[in-house]
Image (cartoon, rainbow, N blue to C red):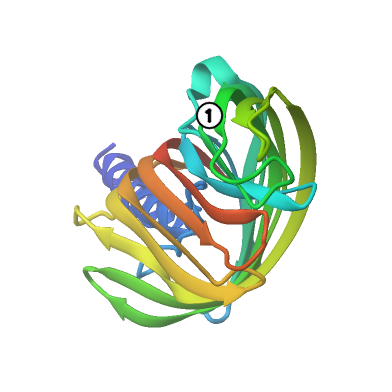
Amino acid sequence: MGIARTEEIEWLAVHDKADRIMSRTANWIAGCLIGGACAPVVAAGPDSVDTGAGWQFALTPYLWLPSVSGTARFTLPNGGADASTGPYNYLQNLRFALMVQGEARKGDWSIFGDAIYLNFGRHGSNVNAFNTSLGSGETQRSVETSLSGGLVEVGGGRTVVQRPWGNVDAILGMRYLGVKETLDASFSASTEGGASANPEVHVSEVQNIVDGFAGVRGRLLLSGDGRWYVPYYLDIGTGSSKFTWQAMSGIGYGAKWGDVSLTYRYLAFYGSGDQLVQTLRFNGPSANVTFRF
C-alpha cells in the first residue's frame, strides 16, 4: 500500500512538471500578430525558439477600429482638387471589413502576412479646388468623399535578441495598398466674366501603392511564466509612396490554445506630386485572438 502511494505521488509530480513545461512552451510558440492593424505579427517568447523544432503556425483574426483621415488629390478638367478624407466615423460609415494575420516560424526564422479590406461609405469633407476651368479658389457648397481599399503585407524576420525579459526580431517586408477614393461635390463659383456657376463634380480614382519596409517586432514579458506580455512592432519604409510607417503596442495574455491581446495600431502613408494619396492615416485600438497549431 505504501509503495503504491509513493508511486502515485511520483507519477503526479512528473505529470505536473511535464504539464507546466508543455504549457509554457505552447504559450511562446508563434507570436501574436500588428495591428493591427493589424495588430502586426509579433515574435514568440524568448524560450519558444527551438532550432531543432519543425514549423509552427499561428492564425490571428482581429478587429481593428481605426480612425481614418488624410488628403487625396483628384484630377479635374484643366486642374485638380485636394479633398480631405475623414476622419471617418468607423461605426457609421464602415460598410465592410475583413482582417486576418498569419505567421509561420521555424527556430529563429519566421514569415508573416497581414490582410485588410475596408469599405467606407460617403462622408462629408472639405475640398480646395485649384487651376480649373472655373478659375481658382472656388468655395464648395457640399462635398462628399468615399474610401475603399485593401492592404496586404508580407515579410520575414529573424530573432536577433533572446533574453529573460523578452525578444527582438529584425524584419523586412513589402506592403501593398490598393485604394479607391471618390469625390462628389457641387461648387459655387464666379467665372472671369462675373457670371455665377454651380458645377457638379463626380470623380473616382484608384492608386496602387507598393512599399518596402524594415523594422523590429517582439514582446516584453511581464510575468515569470511568460503569460502576460507587451507586444510591440515598428517599421518604416518607402517606395510608391514617399514615406510610410507603422507602430503597434498593447498588452497580451497567453493561454494553452493561443493568445488574446488588446493593442493600439498606427499606420500612415505620405505621397507626393500628383499622387491620389497625399496623406492617409489609420490609427485606433485592435482586439486580437491568435490560434496556434
**Mark 1: secondary structure:** loop
The residue under label 1 is which amino acid type?
A: Ser
The percent coordinates of residue 40 (x first, y second) are 50, 55
The spot of residue 156 in percent (x, y) is 60, 74
Q: Quadrant of the N terminus?
A: top left
Q: Is residue 114 left or right of residue 249?
A: right
Left or right: 282 in relation to 165: right
| Residue under the point 45% across and 33% down | 87
Residue nearest the viewer, comparing 26 with 229: 229
Q: Residue furthest bottom?
A: 160
Where in the figure is residue 58, as x and y percent of width and height? 60, 52
**The residue positioned farthest toward the front in the image shown:** 193
Q: Is residue 290 above or below residue 97?
A: below
Residue lying at 64% horizontally and 71% vertically, measured from the top left? 211
Q: 73 or 231: nearer the eye?
A: 73
151 versus 161 height, above or below = above
Instruction: Give 71 or 179, whichever is nearer the viewer.
Output: 71
Residue at the image point whose x is 24% and y is 41% from the top: 2
Residue that badge 1 annotates: 125
Query: How far across and down, in percent of the image, does residue 155 sit?
Result: 63, 70
